[in-house]
């Protein structure tokens, strides 16, 4: 019983030590789309090879959201200049 408890405590201590040594990474946020500067475009494709376009959603240069076609499939995101 004592040996199992000691093993469990050692395992927890090693896990805590390993986690504290591994550096945390920060997520990269996508740039914001700005009216008059850039626009964001989400193109939706039927297949993973992005050959058949089935819909789009975006934020255009005037600051207006638009949606066309189907919003289900394989998505490609782009930021385009105005």
Image: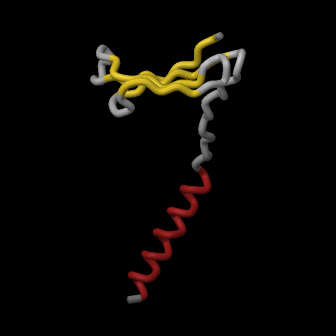
In the image, residue 37 above or below residue 24: above
Please provide percent x and percent y for residue 30. 61, 30
Residue found 47% across the figure and 27% down from its top: 67
- Name the residue rendered at 67%, 19% in the picture: 62
Write down the quadrant of residue 46 in the picture.
top left
Q: Which residue does the image show at 39% across and 81% down from the upper left?
A: 4
Residue in front for this viewpoint, 24 or 81: 81
User: Could you tell whether 21 is left or right of 77 in the image?
Assistant: right
Q: Quadrant of residue 48?
A: top left
From the viewer's perspective, is 65 left or right of 63?
left
Taking the spot 60% from the left edge, 39% from the top edge, the residue there is 27
The front one of 39 and 26 is 39
> Does residue 28 appear to the left or right of 45 in the view shown?
right
- Residue 32: image location, x then y, percent: 66, 28
Position of residue 68 in the picture relative to residue 22 (left or right)? left
Q: Is residue 6 above or below residue 13?
A: below
Q: Position of residue 54 (x, y in %)?
A: 33, 22
Quadrant showing the N terminus: bottom left
């Amino acid at each position: 019983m004592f040996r199992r408890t000691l093993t469990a405590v050692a395992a927890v201590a090693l896990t805590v030590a390993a986690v504290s040594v591994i550096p945390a990474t920060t997520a990269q946020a996508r740039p914001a789309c700005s009216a008059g500067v850039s626009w964001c475009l989400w193109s939706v494709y039927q297949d993973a090879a992005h050959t058949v376009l089935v819909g789009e959603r975006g934020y255009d240069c005037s600051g207006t959201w638009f949606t066309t076609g189907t919003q289900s499939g394989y998505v490609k995101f782009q930021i385009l200049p105005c």
